[in-house]
Structures are given as structure tokens and as C-alpha cells.
């Protein structure tokens, strides 16, 4: 179906919904690389005007990727709840934006329509929203998940303590993890990106992290971010796996490139449930996504990268994850060119994930060859706190020495706690006080004697 609009007697025509969505997307280098972006700001405005007038129902009759050949599209169709959709079914995309921004549209209303929304509807409305709109709506939507700590409560900010090491050295991982803990980082997860994907290394890393967690009685969960099939093999050997991790994307072909499909993810979820390491209703999965993943795999089918990103959220929410985060600037300037594009994309991803009912976090990051710097990351972090992001990722000195990209530092999390008044998960907040890391006001102490004494007794540091 073709779409068109007129600006100053110039008619702009868009051949189908896929093209309309791409042309309406705020400027980013990935869509330009793919040859699907608007020719300039006037065509982009025309597409946004046409998109705003489009009924939400149109997304139920025109698939961007055929479900006959894509299991993600099939999943999106299966997830759609007509009863939940009925509350907004008469609206256009523009009217949906207005409904989202109404003061009377709060947590209850947003939660009620969650499964009435398809990823394409959510992506569409984000394309016609300003930065403040994305923040306003996301801040209303609370998505709470639980394992040993409770993540996503309004007014709180959790952190992933990321103690990566270039050679997966146990000493290095343990020292880095403790460095983060001393700064109060790690209530979402202590999670290592392994340098290899060998099952033996995976088991060693999760065992190391589990000993650290249990010996210090930390109310958090741990994760080795190896491939999901490696996690399955480790769980078959009864390894202490808390969270099962996997990167996912918005098409079957892109997920094939990651070596996964829905059946494998279900197998992993079932295996994690079988370990019974958390309560029966604990959330056990951890997913990462990122704009440009499908395009980089030549698996986007002409769909813009932001819409492909939101389609990945349908995969994630199928497995009730504890954590989901977009690694927003990790792929590089070919997809998000500069700080402005990274900031916009991070806020879009967070907004869209929250509307889809996901416990959304953001890895506030960039590569060293992007036109961005740490002040851009300060800006995005602050805006995400205003939007009530569930968690962010922190590393020593904001420099990941294994993945070779720039993220947030543990000190940045302290800024959020002390200046923006965003305490960690309540269980972790209490633990920080008990071990003497923070005072009664939640401020870091200079001499955390109790924890330092307990750390010195850990035999794992000599592993």
C-alpha cells in the first residue's frame, strides 16, 4: 500500500509501510549506509507527517517482514493481544503519541496495553517523538523483575558490574569485580564477557563469580556472557549458572547469524529453571541488543535499523528476562555516527523497550572511532536517569580493556546515586550499609573496613 503527503504543493509518495518507516526515522548513519534513509529533512518531515496520520490498525495488515519466512514475525503475530489493543485500536500513530503523553495515562494504562502493541507500532510512535517525549513516557512505565535483587523500582538505578579481562584471568576478573563492588556497582548483575567461548572457561568464570557472591553474601546475581549453547552445556554439568545470556536481533536471519533461534532460547530458559537457583518465579534470562545488528548481518530486509531493534524486543519478552540492555554505541559510527545519534538512539531504545514491557537498561557507550566523547555519555546517562532506566553498565575507568570500547565508570554510578538521588536495588542498598560501604544516607564511606577485611580472607583471589 502506498502512502503520501503534501508539503507546500510538493507531493511526497512512499511505496509501502517499510519505506515510510525508514524515511520517517531521525537521521542516522546506518540507514544512510543501507540506502533507505530520507533524502533530507524535508522528506523526513513529510514521512513523519504521513506516519502520524496512519491508523495503528495498519500495522496488523501489512507486515514489514513476511511471517511465512521469518519466525520473529510469526512470534510478533502470536504475541498480539486483540483485547489489550482494543483500548487504543481507534487511534492513529499521532493520536497514540498524544495518548501516551496525557498526564492521566500512567502505569496502569501503559501496562494494560503492553501486549496489544507490536514492535512496529512502538517504533513508529517513537519516530515522531521529541527527546523530552521519550523521557516523559518511559519515566511513567515501571517494569520490575526479581532474582536475588529487585530491579526496576521507580526512582532507583541498578548497575551491571562488568569485570572483563583480556585473557579471562581469574585474578584479574576477581580484582575488577571487587573494584566495582567497593564503588557500589553490581546490584543488577556481576557479568563477565568471556574472551573465549570454551565450556571449561565458562564454568570456571561462573564458579569464580558464584564464590565471590556467596562468600560476601551479596544480594545479586552473576552471569558469564558466553553463547547460549555454551551455557546449556555448562548447565548440563551442573555449573552454578544464575542468568543465561544471549544477544538477539529482530529477524530470523539475524538470529541465525548469532547461532540461535527461539527453540534454543527456550531450551536454555528451561534448563536455567531446572537448576532452581532462584525462587520459582525468578527471572532468569539476560538479553543484549543494539541498533545496526541486523544491518551488519545483511539481515534487515530493507527495514530501518531502529524498527529492527524493536522487533528484537519481541524475542526478549517471550522469555521474561531479568535484564535487557541495548549496547547503544558499541557497533560503531557506521550505524550511529556521533554523540547526537547515540543519545537519540539510547533514549529511543529505552522508551521502546519499556512500552514493550521489558526491564530495559542501556550500555551507555561508544567506540573510539566514533564522533563522540565521555561528555556525550554524561548527557545520555543523565537523561536516562530522568527516564527511569532500569540499569546501566559500569567498568573501571569507563574503559573496557577486553572489548576495547568506552562505557561508563563506577564513579559515574556514584554520581547518579549521590547527585541524582538514584539508590540501587533495596536489597543491595541494605547490604552496602551492612558491610560499611555506605552511610545511612547512602553515601560512600572512605574506609569500608568491614568489606575490606572480608575480601582479604577470600581464597578465590589466589585462583
Image: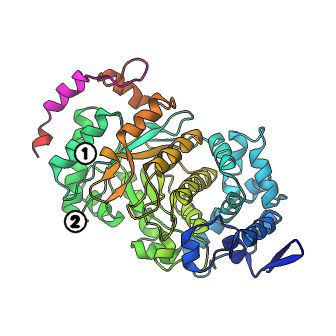
Please give the name of the residue rendered at 32% of the width and 48% of the height, measured from the top-left corner.
Answer: 162
Please give the name of the residue rendered at 22% of the width and 56% of the height, measured from the top-left corner.
Answer: 203
Q: Is residue 438 above or below residue 230?
A: above
Left or right, residue 16 beside residue 153: right
Name the mark on residue 198. 2
Provide the residue designation for mark 1: 209
Q: In the structure shown, which secondary structural element does the residue marked by tag 1 occupy?
A: helix
- Badge 2: how crowded within 10 Å, few (<14), some, or many (20+)? few
Regarding residue 347, the answer to whether it shows in the image is yes
Q: CA distance from mark 2 to mark 1?
A: 17 Å
Q: How far across and down, in percent of the image, does residue 259 sit?
A: 39, 73
Q: Which residues are magenta?
A: 440-458
User: Would you say residue 412 sits in the magenta stretch?
Assistant: no
Q: How far across and down, in percent of the image, does residue 452 sit?
A: 20, 27
Q: Nearer the viewer, residue 267 or 126?
A: 126
Residue at the far right: name it: 9
Q: Quadrant of the N terminus?
A: bottom right
Q: Is residue 255 above or below residue 341?
A: below
Regarding residue 424, the answer to whether it shows in the image is no
Left or right, residue 418 beside residue 309: left
Q: In the structure shown, which secondary structural element does the residue marked by tag 2 occupy?
A: loop
Left or right, residue 266 beside residue 453: right
Amino acid at each position: 500500500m502506498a502512502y503520501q503527503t503534501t508539503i507546500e504543493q510538493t507531493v511526497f509518495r512512499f511505496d509501502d509501510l517499510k519505506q515510510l518507516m525508514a524515511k520517517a526515522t531521525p537521521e542516522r548513519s546506518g540507514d544512510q549506509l543501507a540506502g533507505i534513509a530520507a533524502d533530507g529533512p524535508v522528506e523526513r518531515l513529510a514521512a513523519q507527517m504521513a506516519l502520524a496520520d496512519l491508523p495503528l490498525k495498519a500495522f496488523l495488515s501489512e507486515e514489514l517482514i513476511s511471517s511465512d519466512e521469518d519466525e520473529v514475525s510469526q512470534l510478533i503475530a502470536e504475541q498480539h493481544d486483540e483485547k489489550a489493543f482494543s483500548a487504543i485500536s481507534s487511534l492513529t500513530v499521532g493520536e497514540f503519541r498524544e495518548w501516551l503523553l496525557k498526564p492521566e495515562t500512567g502505569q496502569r494504562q501503559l501496562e494494560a496495553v503492553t501486549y496489544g502493541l507490536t514492535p512496529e507500532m512502538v517504533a513508529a510512535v517513537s519516530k515522531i517523538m521529541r527527546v523530552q517525549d521519550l523521557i516523559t513516557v518511559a519515566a511513567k512505565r515501571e517494569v520490575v523483575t526479581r532474582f536475588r535483587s529487585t530491579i526496576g523500582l521507580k526512582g532507583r538505578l541498578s548497575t551491571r558490574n562488568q569485570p572483563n579481562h583480556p585473557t579471562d584471568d581469574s585474578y584479574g576478573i576477581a580484582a575488577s569485580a571487587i573494584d566495582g563492588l567497593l564503588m557500589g556497582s553490581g546490584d543488577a548483575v556481576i557479568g563477565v564477557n568471556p574472551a573465549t567461548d570454551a565450556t571449561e572457561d565458562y564454568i570456571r568464570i561462573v564458579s569464580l563469580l558464584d564464590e565471590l557472591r556467596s562468600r560476601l553474601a551479596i544480594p545479586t546475581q552473576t552471569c558469564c556472557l558466553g553463547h547460549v549453547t555454551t551455557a546449556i552445556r555448562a548447565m548440563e554439568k551442573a555449573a552454578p549458572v544464575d542468568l543465561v545470556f544471549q544477544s538477539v536481533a529482530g529477524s530470523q536471519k539475524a538470529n541465525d547469524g548469532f547461532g540461535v533461534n527461539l527453540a534454543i532460547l527456550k531450551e536454555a530458559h528451561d534448563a536455567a529453571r531446572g537448576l532452581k537457583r532462584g525462587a520459582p518465579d525468578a527471572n532468569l534470562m539476560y538479553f543484549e541488543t543494539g541498533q545496526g545488528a541486523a544491518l551488519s548481518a545483511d539481515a534487515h530486509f530493507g527495514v530501518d535499523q531502529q524498527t529492527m531493534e524493536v522487533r528484537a524486543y519481541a524475542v526478549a519478552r517471550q522469555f521474561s528476562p531479568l535484564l535487557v540492555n541495548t549496547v547503544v554505541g558499541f557497533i560503531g559510527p557506521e550505524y550511529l555516527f556521533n554523540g547526537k545519534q547515540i543519545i537519540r538512539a539510547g533514549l529511543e531504545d529505552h522508551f521502546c523497550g519499556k512500552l514493550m514491557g521489558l526491564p530495559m537498561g542501556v550500555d551507555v557507550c561508544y567506540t573510539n572511532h566514533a564522533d563522540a566523547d565521555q561528555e556525550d555519555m554524561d548527557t545520555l546517562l543523565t537523561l536516562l536517569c530522568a527516564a527511569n532506566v532500569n540499569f546501566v553498565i559500569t567498568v573501571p575507568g569507563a574503559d573496557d580493556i577486553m572489548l576495547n570500547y568506552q562505557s561508563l565508570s563506577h564513579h559515574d554510578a556514584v554520581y547518579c546515586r549521590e547527585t541524582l538521588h538514584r539508590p540501587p536495588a533495596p536489597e543491595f542498598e541494605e547490604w552496602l550499609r551492612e558491610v560499611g560501604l555506605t552511610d545511612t544516607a547512602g553515601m560512600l564511606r572512605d574506609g569500608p573496613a568491614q568489606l575490606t577485611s572480608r575480601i582479604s580472607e577470600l581464597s578465590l583471589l589466589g585462583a
